[in-house]
Image: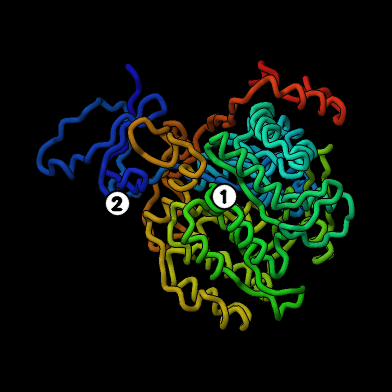
Amino acid sequence: MTEMLRIAGGTIYDPANNIDGEVRDLWIRDGRIVAVTLSDAAVKPKKEAKLPFTATRTINATGLVILPGGIDMHCHIAGPKVNAGRQMSPEDRRTDPTWDNLGRNVPTTHITGYKYAGLGYTTAFDAAISPLSARQAHLEFADTPCIDSGCYLLVADHQYLLEAVRDNRADRVKTFLAWLLGAARGYAPKLVNPGGIETWKRSRSGSPLDLDAIVDGYSITPRQIISAIADATSELQLPHPMHIHCNNLGLPGNWTTTLETMKLLAGRKAHLTHIQFHSYAGGDADEGTFGSRVEPLVSYFNEHSNLSIDVGQILFGPTTSMTGDSAVGYYLSRLYKTRWYSHDVEVESGCGVSPIEYKQKSVVHAWQWAIGLEWFLLAADPWRVALSTDHPNGGSFTSYPRIIRLLMDAGYRREMLAHLPRQVREQSLLRTIDREYTLREIAIITRAAPARLLGLTDKGHLGVGAEADITIYTPDADRELMFQLPRYVLKSGVLLIDNYERQTPVAGKQLWLTPQYDTDERQHITDWMDRHYTIRAKNYAFAEEEK
């Protein structure tokens, strides 16, 4: 007989199916949800209800809260930059060999999977993988248990694409993106500081690059690069259109570049990532001019449904900055006078890695903390918002429960604000915001919205046919404690956490796209790669047996 698992009597929050705190049963078979029914108590409190199936095991979830498995749509957990981060931060790894202590900010692949599962997360996407390094990243994903995984491929400073934009060859931009996603197993195109990486590689000036600045060597602008990729992804109808790390990340006054990028994307879907790092006032490095410009940005965002964001919330404490933006890594290393690593990949992209620490007494760091929360609390539509720390750039993903508490508990938020520098206490919009997220809204920004924004139709919800990625929490007034310690976690119907106890891990799936394109156009890509790469084009893509 096929095994059937029944989760009985739990209080379900499933926004995608408009279930908001209802007591229902879930039935699971072969890794999928096969029925969602009103619980026995809700249907017939005095008589035994007729069940649609016979359960081989029943989990009594009475009084517990049931959510879909969490989805982290923007993190850094694989590839060269992450391995460099592990090597550069040996202090992050303690001598205790237990699974809980093998790296907090940059854990090993194996521990990454366990830690995600231990929070109730079952899917994660690395947000910046160089296509030439994708094979290594996917090998690391295969070594990361308990979660499904995928990656976004760095494309905005790929020299083939820059040449296609320069030559006004929209057809080549489209074909290249489609071919690249399939060849390197990517899930979405990632734009990082479009044109800025190439300019920095050539000049090392580290100067800001606005949308209409000229990209060294190509006589094109970031505006043209973004527009060309936006048009191509729209025509390809990708499930997640494009993931944009705007120009001038982290620089005072960068909010104007962010607003111009939003306006440039009018009428075309796009996701702006770690928006907190792109919402700064100021014109120089003087702390007195630094501040928040969330208000005009979120006002535009609220009025334009083509845009979505993840926040990139920072948490105070030590962490490791790792990004596909080499210039930012260099800038941070000089700012904090710390060690730095740059990884330049062929003609494709680069990355910068540098250990940093966010300090509560720092005016700039306190503003960054406040700016992220302003975005969460002022964005009107949670369906276009995803929770993230840009792990580990703003802090570890293990800090998500603390962020949830900050969003759900205005009193706790004010208590934290009271300990920040006076400038932030008196000027941040947080002092006037009373909004508290509901459990439904938390379920949206951590589950339902990321699934919808990524086009994952069988994730982020608990309807019939959905993958049985499920988290069951014990309610607690301390929301941080509640979300830190799920009672049960299921991945594809298999229990990873059973009554708080870890079980044998399961292997997750790897997610990628194979967009359709005109294969006759591929020859130009092949010829170009054979001229410019150290490997032949025929050896670049994943072989059939590797899939």
Residue 113: percent from left, percent from top: 59, 39
Circle 2 residues within 10 Å: few <14, some 14–19, many ≥20? some
Instruction: Farthest residue to the right: give it.
Output: 203
The residue lying at 60 percent from left, 59 percent from top is 275
Q: Which residue is labeled 2 in the image? A: 21
Q: Which residue is labeled 1 in the image? A: 271
Circle 1 residues within 10 Å: few <14, some 14–19, many ≥20? many
Residue 372 occupies quadrant: bottom right
The residue lying at 61 percent from left, 42 percent from top is 231
- Which image quadrant: the C terminus? top right
Residue situated in front as seen by the camera: 40 or 78: 78
Residue 529: percent from left, percent from top: 81, 28
N-terminal of the pair, mark 1 or mark 2, is 2
Residue situated in front as seen by the camera: 62 or 450: 450
Residue situated in front as seen by the camera: 252 or 296: 296
Residue 421 occupies quadrant: bottom right
Image position of 23 (left or right of 32): left
What amino acid does circle 2 point to?
Gly
Residue 440: percent from left, percent from top: 37, 54
Q: Do labels 1 and 2 touch, CB within 8 Å?
A: no
The residue lying at 49 percent from left, 75 percent from top is 414
